[in-house]
């Protein structure tokens, strides 16, 4: 490809210029080709962002006049216990889901990368399968499995002589249920990403370690994990950004009567309720900006911690 | 020692595969029973004989096919538009030369960093002003040229389409659009396959934005119809879960045919990051 490039450029400057002149008739084509994206972004991306900055400092019920109220909304946000409780719920759900999920994905990727498996592609596909299902469908299913009264989960608890658990009404357990939806759906996806990374680790490392008598556990902790550091960081960042925006799982599981005290109210769910149920579009936008500030903060924090932690392992 | 090690690794992977498949099986188990059979303790793991009956009930008592048709319409229309606009722009960024190209592309990548949640409320305002609330236009048009897809196609074109081929076509007097349509597009097919799957599934599974935009039940997508079904028949588990199973089935079929493209697409994506 590169070579042919040079070949066509080899002739003297004259024909090149002539060629350029001929194609100037079509000078506008590239801009026309990329224009749709920029036009759409201008209307449906840039305008909403700017407008949401204005809305965040205003009061608006969705129908009447928008009243600019300045910093009032920000003061309200700082003192809004419901917002901070929703934040707590979101962070707990994220932590309960992300860490087991990424660790499991890493272990599975490591195991599948060993030479012992014959049908590797099939195993990969089967482990990835949960990722293609819709959050709504899978949350409905998990809601029935973890139903308070007669779901499979409580049935199994009875079977081993334990008492049933009010999965969906206990703040702690409902977070576990939401986290388990995420774990089920994203472990295989992250495993695929880790497998890509493992395939790029030089074989020499593993062979040298094996010669020195290292077992799989040592290879995993001393070679695989440190070598995958950038990819682990990437998945932690992606999971954090996704985790802070959890909505569908919570809303489908606890559709009405959800309260921040109930455990399932996430920040985006609170934003949705504030704007589209209580018609406080101004304050809803303030929550959105609060969420974005948190995403930026968490990403930075994650970067810092993950970088440090994995260096520690090394 | 290694035999025990290998055995436990096999066991671990085996359990993981079972756990990832079990919910699908359990969906089938619940969808194949009568309501009264479901509440039994200890729970039975066997498939019942009511599946066909439950499917008929879902079709008769809910507007399942209507919602399926709506979803297919939205997903297919969006996907076709995304494929066209993204491949055109991706091709332009990869193979055409124009002023401001580098800046425009960096700008495009930058837009991917903007969190979607910021847009929900003001976008709703905008849709209201445009009169698009309740209309599929609000679900299809804003996303029909997206940064991710353009980036994806651009990378693929840069890697696979030889410049010499395009030069030759130019010398033969082909217009740029003609070159894109007849030469570049066929070469891009594998990248388009992944983008199509990705976009179709995203559209099929989308929940929050349709929930906000669609206010008329006749226009509901499958996902909205499902949550509505869950609300109405909260005590009739088999009916709810049969609906869920039917809504999941098309994606499972898609996966059986295209799992390779999907997984290798994600793999390529990870490499590029």
Image (tube, coloured by chain):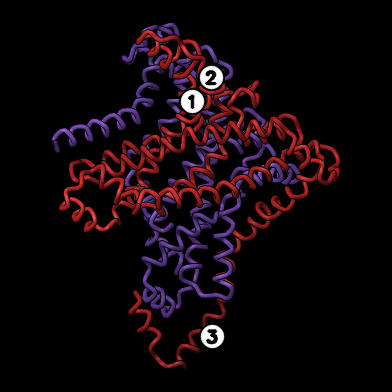
Chain colours: A red, B purple
In front of the other: A141 or B236: A141
Q: Quadrant of the N terminus of chain A?
A: bottom left
Horizontal arrangement in the rendering, residue B171 relative to residue A173 (left or right): left
Nearer the observer: mark 2 or 3; the answer is 2
Provide residue A267's location: percent of width, then percent of height. Answer: 63, 35
Is tag 3's residue or tag 1's residue first in the polypeptide sequence? 3
Q: Residue at x 31, y 36 (%)?
A: A126
Is tag 2's residue or tag 3's residue first in the polypeptide sequence? 3
Nearer the observer: mark 3 or 1; the answer is 1
**Where residue A21 is drawn, which disc sits there?**
3
Residue matched to label 1: A177
- Separation (CA) of disc 1 from disc 2: 8 Å
Q: Residue at x 41, y 15 (%)?
A: A152
Secondary element under disc 3, as helix, strand or loop, is helix
Residue matched to label 2: A168
Give the farthest residue toward the front: A312
Provide residue B255's location: percent of width, then percent of height. Answer: 36, 39
Q: Quadrant of residue B179?
A: bottom left
In front of the other: B248 or B101: B101
In front of the other: B164 or B267: B267
């Amino acid at each position: 490809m590169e070579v042919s490039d040079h070949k066509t450029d080899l002739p003297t400057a004259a024909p090149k210029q002539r060629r350029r002149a001929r194609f100037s008739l079509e000078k506008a084509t590239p801009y026309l080709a990329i224009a749709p994206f920029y036009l759409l972004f201008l209307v449906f991306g840039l305008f909403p962002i700017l407008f949401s900055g204005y809305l965040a400092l205003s009061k608006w019920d969705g129908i009447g006049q928008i009243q600019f109220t300045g910093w009032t909304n920000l003061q309200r946000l700082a003192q809004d216990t419901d917002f901070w409780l929703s934040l707590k719920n979101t962070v707990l759900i994220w932590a309960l889901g992300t860490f087991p999920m990424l660790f499991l994905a890493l272990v599975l990727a490591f195991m599948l990368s060993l030479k012992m498996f014959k049908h590797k592609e099939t195993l990969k596909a089967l482990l990835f399968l949960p990722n293609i299902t819709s959050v709504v469908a899978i949350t409905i299913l998990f809601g029935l499995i973890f139903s308070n009264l007669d779901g499979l989960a409580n049935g199994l608890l009875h079977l081993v002589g334990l008492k049933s658990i009010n999965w969906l009404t206990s703040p702690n357990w409902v977070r576990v249920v939401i986290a388990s939806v995420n774990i089920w759906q994203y472990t295989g996806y992250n495993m695929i990403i880790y497998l890509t990374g493992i395939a790029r680790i030089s074989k020499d490392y593993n062979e040298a370690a094996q010669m020195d008598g290292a077992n799989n556990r040592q290879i995993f902790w001393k070679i695989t994990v440190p070598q995958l550091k950038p990819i682990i960081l990437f998945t932690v960042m992606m999971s954090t950004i996704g985790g802070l925006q959890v909505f569908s799982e919570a809303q489908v599981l606890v559709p009405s009567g959800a309260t921040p005290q109930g455990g399932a109210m996430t920040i985006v769910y609170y934003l949705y309720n504030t704007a589209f149920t209580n018609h406080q579009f101004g304050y809803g936008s303030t929550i959105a900006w609060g969420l974005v500030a948190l995403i930026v903060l968490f990403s930075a924090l994650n970067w810092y911690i993950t970088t440090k932690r994995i260096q520690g392992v090394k | 020692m290694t035999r025990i090690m290998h055995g436990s690794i096999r066991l671990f992977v085996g359990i993981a595969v079972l756990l990832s498949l079990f919910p699908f099986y359990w969906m089938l188990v619940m969808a194949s029973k009568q309501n009264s059979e479901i509440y039994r303790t200890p729970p039975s793991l066997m498939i019942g004989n009511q599946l066909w009956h439950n499917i008929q009930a879902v079709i008769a008592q809910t507007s399942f096919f209507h919602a399926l048709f709506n979803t297919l319409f939205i997903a297919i229309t969006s996907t076709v538009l995304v494929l066209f606009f993204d491949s055109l722009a991706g091709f332009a960024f990869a193979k055409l030369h124009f002023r401001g190209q580098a800046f425009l592309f960096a700008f495009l990548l930058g837009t991917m960093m903007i969190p979607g949640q910021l847009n929900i409320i003001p976008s709703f305002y905008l849709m209201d002003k445009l009169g698009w609330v309740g209309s599929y236009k609000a679900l299809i048009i804003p996303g029909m040229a997206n940064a991710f897809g353009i980036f994806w196609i651009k990378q693929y074109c840069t890697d696979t389409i030889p410049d010499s081929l395009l030069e030759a076509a130019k010398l033969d007097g082909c217009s740029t659009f003609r070159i894109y349509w007849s030469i570049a597009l066929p070469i891009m097919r594998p990248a388009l396959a992944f983008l199509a799957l990705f976009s179709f599934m995203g559209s099929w599974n989308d929940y929050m934005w349709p929930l906000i935009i669609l206010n008329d039940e006749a226009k509901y997508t499958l996902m909205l119809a499902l949550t509505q079904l869950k609300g109405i028949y909260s005590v009739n588990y088999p009916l709810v879960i049969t609906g869920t199973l039917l809504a999941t089935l098309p994606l499972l079929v898609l996966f059986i045919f295209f799992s390779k493209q999907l997984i290798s697409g994600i793999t390529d994506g990870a490499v590029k990051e």
